[in-house]
Amino acid sequence: MNIPEATKPVLWGAVGGAIAAMVIGFSWGGWMTGGAAVEMTEAGAESAVVQAFTPLCVAKAEQQPEQIALLKEESSYQRDDFVIEAGWVSNVSEKYQSEVADSCADLIVEGME
């Protein structure tokens, strides 16, 4: 089979163009793999759960003002454990309790300052 001599540069140009398009697309074009898209979706869902349950936790905490004073005395690293032990996040799934408790504690302490 005879391939014209001008075909070789055209094929190399197409290969180079495809590679350049992929590099530019993934680097600056906002393209992503399916795995990265799934990770972004899961992170967004977790953030939504935390945002939805934090006000409920704060409402439960406001029903126990004596516990709120004790919460402020805790170190910032132990506040989420305090919130969990106080039962303010008992209606939250085990998977999200720590994140909701941390957000709730931060919101309560910021509100007190």
Image (cartoon, rainbow, N blue to C red):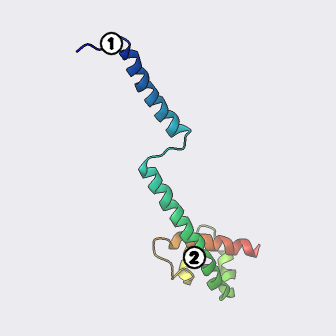
Image position of 110 with respect to 5: above or below = below
Quick check: 24 left or right of 10? right
| In this rendering, the label closer to the viewer, 1 or 2 | 1
Q: Which mark is residue 53?
A: 2
Residue at image position (56%, 65%) is 47
Query: Looking at the figure, which quarter contains the C terminus?
Result: bottom right
Number of other residues with Cα within 10 Å of mark 1, as a class: few under 14, some 14 to 19, many 20 or more: few
Q: Which residue is mark 1?
A: 4
Residue at image position (57%, 82%) is 88
Quick check: 17 left or right of 67? left
Image position of 46 with respect to 81: above or below = above
Q: Amino acid at mark 1?
A: Pro
In which quarter of the view is residue 79 placed?
Answer: bottom right
* Element class at badge 2: helix
Nearest to the observer: residue 69 or residue 22: 22
Query: Looking at the figure, which quarter contains the N terminus?
Result: top left
Residue 43: give x, y in percent of width and height: 51, 60
Task: Point out the residue furthest to the bottom here.
Answer: 63
Quick check: 68 left or right of 28? right
Task: Point out the residue furthest to the left here.
Answer: 1
Q: Amino acid at mark 2?
A: Phe
Whether residue 79 is visible, yes or no, is no
The Cα atoms of the two marked residues, 1 and 2, are separated by 68 Å
Residue at image position (42%, 51%) is 35
Residue at image position (53%, 81%) is 85
Nearest to the observer: residue 63 or residue 85: 63
